[in-house]
Image (cartoon, rainbow, N blue to C red):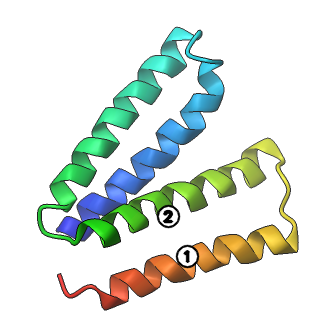
Amino acid sequence: MAWLILIAAGLLEIVWAVGLKYTHGFTRPMPTVVTIIAMIASMGLLGLAVRSLPIGTAYAVWTGIGTVGTVLFGIFALSESASPLRLVCVSLIVIGIIGLKALTTT
């Protein structure tokens, strides 16, 4: 269950990271509210997950999910670069997440 909570926290991290772009420096009310709610929920779920997962693993997986999801959003929705080297770097993050999950006994 802790892993599912951690995945949800990571998905919410994508929401708030992407939301930051749309707040325009926290000057637009609705995107700002959504971003802040996603931040609080993401941190709260991370806090629940680390009750039974190692903090280093949980934090790395949480930020990894957020990083990969945000990069993919940028590529597909914002026409950011999808250069081969950038995709290799994102793949390395995914490999790291899978490795940490595989090596964690909880």
Residue farthest front in this picture: 56
User: From what the image shows, is residue 92 above or below residue 12?
Assistant: below
- Alpha-carbon distance for marks 1 and 2? 7 Å
Horizontally, residue 50 falls left or right of residue 25, namely left
Q: Secondary structure at mark 1?
A: helix
Label 1 Cα crowd, 10 Å radius (few <14 / some 14-19 / many 20+): some
Residue at 44% over, 87% down: 99
User: From what the image shows, is residue 1 above or below residue 66?
Assistant: below
The amino acid type of the residue labelled 2 equals Gly
User: From what the image shows, is residue 13 above or below residue 60?
Assistant: above
Image quarter (top left, top right, bottom left or bottom right) of the C terminus: bottom left
User: Of residues 5 and 40, which is closer to you in this image?
Assistant: 40
- The first of marks 1 and 2 along the sequence is 2
User: Of residues 89 and 15, which is closer to you in this image?
Assistant: 89
Q: Secondary structure at mark 2?
A: helix
Q: Position of residue 20 (x, y in %)?
A: 58, 30
Q: Position of residue 89 (x, y in %)?
A: 71, 73
The amino acid type of the residue labelled 1 equals Val
Quadrant hosting residue 52: bottom left
Q: What number of labels is visible?
A: 2
Q: Which residue is mark 2?
A: 64
Q: Position of residue 101 (x, y in %)?
A: 35, 82
Residue farthest left in this picture: 51
Quadrant hosting residue 75: bottom right
Residue at 65% over, 30% down: 21
Image quarter (top left, top right, bottom left or bottom right) of the N terminus: bottom left
Q: Position of residue 82 (x, y in %)?
A: 83, 62
Which label belongs to residue 94? 1
Label 2 Cα crowd, 10 Å radius (few <14 / some 14-19 / many 20+): many
Horizontally, residue 27 falls left or right of residue 34, namely right
Contact, CB < 8 Å: mark 1 with mark 2?
yes
